[in-house]
Image: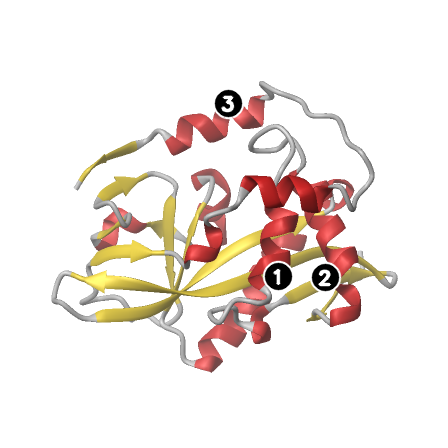
Amino acid sequence: MNIKLRLERPSDYFETENVTREAFWNHYSPGCCEHYLIHVMRGSQNFVPELDIVAESNGRIIGNVVYQKALIKGDDGADYEVLSLGPISVLPEYQKQGVGGKMIEYSKNIAREMGFRAILLCGDPDYYGRQGFVPAETMGIRTSDNMYAAALHVCELNEGSLANVKGRYFEDAVYEIDETASAEFDKRFPHKELVTGTPMQKRFEQVAAMRREA
């Protein structure tokens, strides 16, 4: 499959949002809010437009990855700027073909050139372990409420770039979704049925619950 990776353009916004909606619908929960999230992320001061990458196949957008600046508040009292990855989306019919991995690797290289030290995310360990991420707790990095979480992963962009960085990871507030606004935004798209209790939803609940005190 011929894949072209490039920066997202304003003219792509609605198509990309629809790709994201298709990718996430009923995946982690009934319906989804990730298409609304990328819509509001683009206006955030911590959004990184240089890392807003789309994947194209035959002129059609089939995937997207975005990043937001975030912080590790170090145990040493210092703040360390890092990146939050996500949402990352691939149309269902193109999933499990390496598209997501290509977008991650491509954007990692750009982030490294921009001088960022590391990328963090909350996601399925089975997938992100194959993309160069390791459990954040192995580096002494916890959630903002000082917990070790199985879903929290980190990737150093240069070897040892987090060697002396231990602390709590704080995402940008844009990830705190206004569910009412998200539901209103979703009305711009064709109606889709909500499905509850899928295997992936149950897997997400299990991983999200895997937290322990630091």
Q: Amino acid at mark 2?
A: Ala
Q: Position of residue 191 (x, y in %)?
A: 80, 34
Look at the picture and state if 174 lies above or below 203.
Answer: below
> What residue would you read off at disc 3?
202
Q: Quadrant of the C terminus?
A: top left
Look at the picture and state if 201 lies above or below 97.
Answer: above
Going from N to C along the chain, the mark reached first, 2 or 3, is 2
Q: Are marks 1 and 2 in contact (CB under 8 Å)?
A: yes
For the residue pair 192 and 94, the one nearer the viewer reads as 192
Q: Which mark is residue 55?
A: 2
Q: Distance between the Cα atoms at labels 1 and 3?
A: 27 Å
Q: Quadrant of the N terminus?
A: bottom right
For mark 1, give the secondary structure: helix
Image quadrant assignment for residue 3: bottom right
Q: Position of residue 120 (x, y in %)?
A: 40, 57
Q: Amino acid at mark 1?
A: Met
Query: What residue occupies the far right of the structure in this picture?
Result: 58
For mark 2, give the secondary structure: strand
Q: Position of residue 35 (x, y in %)?
A: 65, 49
Q: Which mark is residue 214?
A: none
How many residues crowd mark 1 within 10 Å: few (<14), some (14–19), many (20+)?
many
Say whether residue 160 is visible: no
Q: Distance between the Cα atoms at labels 2 and 3?
A: 29 Å
Q: Which mark is residue 103?
A: 1
Image quadrant assignment for residue 77: bottom left
